[in-house]
């Protein structure tokens, strides 16, 4: 196996498999220009428990596998590039005499999906933590369920003003920022799965501290500790899924994290209806600990990331993990490719990776300033959209919009609480819609439409609030969450891995995650303060922020649809500049 050539071939294969027909010829031509490779590639695994060895041999040339494969044959699912049905790609020469499908061309399979769900239980817990304060907010901070009373050493509520409540809520994303700073280093040492298992200690500790709170300080500390767990989860769930995914399942699993966060948020709000009254809101916070303990048990049955194991030299374990993720498929050539890529990186290991300052200042071999700016902007724009403010404070906003009296607020479920549940549910539906249209329309087009629509919905919220039209405000909030989550809500999570080369991915991803969490902290903390100060004009700010995101999509956003990272870097290298115009899919050359 020749690592450098194999990387180029994989990039070209990705381009062929993910572009429309007009791009196939150029991609195939690029591969054809590469020098010939050996006719047979063999990987011999270490001895197994029985003392025997396994060898995986491809009797077809690497060149044939990538170039001379008929264009009509696309994947094991039977779909072809031209839309016609085709037979699955089968490897010949299996030692057992049984032909098996090549795992490199497989779509999402049952084993991979179950493992992704098990890993994403951390994302569900993340959603639970950020959503659990929404519906019971009035009970906790305003004692809307009745005067403060003490039972068994615990108060029925913890009265505070809007500034302190904003700080308590904002401490969760501040904790997430802290968690994002060290999660990558720990995961590179102990592994993705093991780090997530250890991370559940933060969810358990934060849940216990919050659920037993007797003061504002204790509640804030509990939210901060839970936030650390959220920050680690936000990094490692996407890392594991990207390393475990097949080429054809990366798009789906890329949005899977955001989907699971919204599922957790929705579930927390459904359960909140029965647990919002004092003192049952404490049980609502404690459930996060139960989710963490359950995931820890489940993760014992999930394989570690094959890429992590291979990087640590644990080849036999890496092969076994890959086979578990690709049950029923032949992983020999996929594992061969993985080893080749790692070998290529080992050859280049003597060259130190560029520092963060070198990347940001453009003092690298390839100037990445435009692409880095795009990644950082997208991660910031996700949080300044106002969507998280809706998630945190929709119950209070709708209670004010519908002018609920103190007795109506005590009635559970109130109309504000029921509408809040719907907002959470529609967000999960929106992500599923976005995941299905992303590869058809392209990242740039989806971002442009999503951000402009979000800005329009924010304007409708302002109009409804000013005219005191509760139904209009509620409808606009539903649409706001729908159009945001279907594009601008999850595209930022895909941006770093699709726009940046591997040698700078770690440092820039960490910086992007930090900016994302800090922006969320600012929005969460200031939202109730701005609500008090601006009243019906609160969402005027989010008209502006989402319109800025729209302008970014039109003039600066790169299009990564169907392109390997090397092609994206080649097209968009250089300083920050205009690369597009108001014609979806077009760019300025």
Image (spheres, helix red, strand yellow):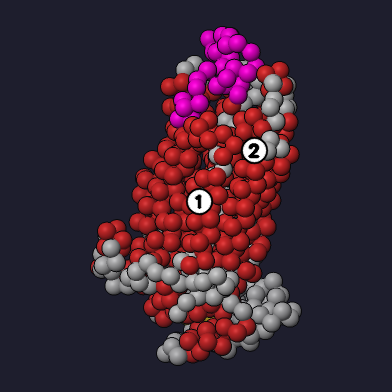
SS class of the residue under badge 2?
helix
The residue most toward the front is: 467
Which residue occupies the foreground of this view, 572 or 43? 572
- 78 drawn magenta: no
Image marks 2 and 1: residues in contact by CB distance under 8 Å: no
Residue at numbered disc 1 = 545
Relative side of 384 to 3, left or right: right
**Residue 66 visible in the current orientation:** yes
Height in image: 360 above or below 39?
above
Q: Residue at x 69, y 71 (%)?
A: 77
Which residue occupies the foreground of this view, 467 or 14? 467
**Residue 304 visible in the current orientation:** no
Which residue occupies the foreground of this view, 398 or 301? 398
Q: Residues within 10 Å of mark 2 (few under 14, many from 20)?
A: many
Q: Residue at x 55, y 49 (%)?
A: 543
Height in image: 555 above or below 429?
below
Residue at numbered disc 2 = 465
| Coordinates of residue 308 in the picture (x, y in percent) | 43, 57
Relative side of 408 to 342, left or right: right
Residues rendered magenta in the picture: 138-167
- 157 drawn magenta: yes
Q: Residue at x 50, y 26 (%)?
A: 162
Marked residue nearer the N-terminal end (2 or 1): 2
């Amino acid at each position: 196996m020749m690592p450098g050539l194999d990387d180029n071939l994989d990039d070209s294969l990705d381009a062929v498999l993910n572009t429309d027909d007009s791009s196939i010829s150029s991609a195939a031509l690029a591969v054809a220009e590469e020098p010939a490779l050996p006719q047979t590639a063999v990987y011999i695994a270490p001895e197994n428990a029985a003392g025997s060895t396994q060898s995986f041999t491809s009797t077809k040339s690497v060149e044939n596998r990538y170039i001379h494969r008929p264009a009509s044959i696309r994947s094991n699912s039977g779909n072809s590039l031209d839309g016609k049905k085709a037979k699955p790609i089968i490897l010949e020469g299996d030692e057992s005499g049984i032909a098996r499908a090549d795992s490199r061309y497989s779509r999402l399979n049952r084993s991979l999906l179950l493992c992704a769900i098990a890993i994403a239980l951390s994302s569900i817990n993340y959603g639970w933590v950020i959503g659990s304060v929404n519906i019971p907010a009035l009970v906790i901070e305003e004692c809307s369920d009745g005067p403060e009373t003490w039972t068994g050493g615990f108060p029925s509520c913890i009265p505070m003003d809007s500034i302190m409540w904003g700080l308590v809520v904002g401490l969760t994303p501040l904790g997430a920022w802290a968690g994002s700073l060290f999660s990558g280093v720990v995961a590179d040492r102990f592994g993705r799965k093991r780090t997530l298992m250890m991370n559940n200690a933060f969810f358990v500790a934060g849940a216990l501290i919050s659920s037993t709170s007797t003061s504002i300080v204790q509640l804030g500390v509990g939210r901060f500790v839970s936030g650390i767990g959220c920050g680690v989860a936000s990094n490692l769930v996407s890392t594991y899924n990207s390393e475990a995914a097949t080429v054809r399942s990366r798009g789906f699993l890329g949005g899977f994290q955001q989907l699971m966060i919204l599922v957790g948020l929705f579930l927390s709000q459904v359960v909140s209806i029965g647990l919002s009254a004092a003192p049952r809101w404490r049980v609502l916070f404690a459930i996060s600990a139960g989710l963490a303990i359950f995931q820890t048990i489940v993760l014992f049955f999930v394989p570690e990331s094959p890429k992590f194991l291979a990087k640590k030299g644990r080849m036999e374990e890496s092969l076994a993990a890959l086979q578990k993720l690709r049950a029923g498929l032949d992983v020999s050539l996929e594992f061969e490719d993985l080893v080749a890529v790692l070998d290529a990186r080992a050859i280049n290991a003597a060259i130190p990776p560029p520092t963060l300052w070198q990347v940001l200042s453009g003092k690298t071999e390839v100037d990445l300033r435009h692409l880095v700016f795009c990644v950082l902007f997208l991660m910031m724009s996700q949080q300044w959209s106002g969507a998280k403010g809706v998630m945190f404070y929709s119950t209070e906003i709708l209670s004010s919009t519908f002018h609920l009296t103190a007795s109506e607020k005590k009635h559970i479920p109130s109309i504000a609480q029921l509408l809040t549940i719907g907002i959470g549910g529609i967000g999960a539906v929106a992500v599923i819609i976005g995941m299905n249209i992303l590869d058809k329309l392209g990242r740039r087009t989806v971002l442009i439409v999503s951000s402009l629509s979000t800005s329009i919905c924010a304007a409708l919220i302002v109009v409804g609030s000013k005219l005191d039209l509760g139904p209009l405000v509620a409808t606009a909030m539903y649409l706001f969450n729908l159009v945001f989550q279907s594009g601008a809500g999850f595209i930022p999570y895909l941006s770093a891995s699709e726009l940046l080369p591997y040698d700078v991915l770690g440092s820039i991803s960490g910086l992007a995650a930090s900016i994302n969490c800090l922006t969320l902290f600012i929005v969460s903390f200031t939202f109730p303060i701005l609500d008090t100060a601006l009243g019906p004009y609160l969402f005027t700010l989010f008209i502006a922020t989402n319109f800025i995101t729209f302008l970014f999509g039109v003039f600066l956003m790169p299009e990564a649809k169907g392109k390997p990272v090397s092609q994206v870097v080649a097209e968009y290298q250089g300083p920050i500049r205009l690369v597009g115009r108001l014609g979806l899919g077009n760019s300025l050359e």
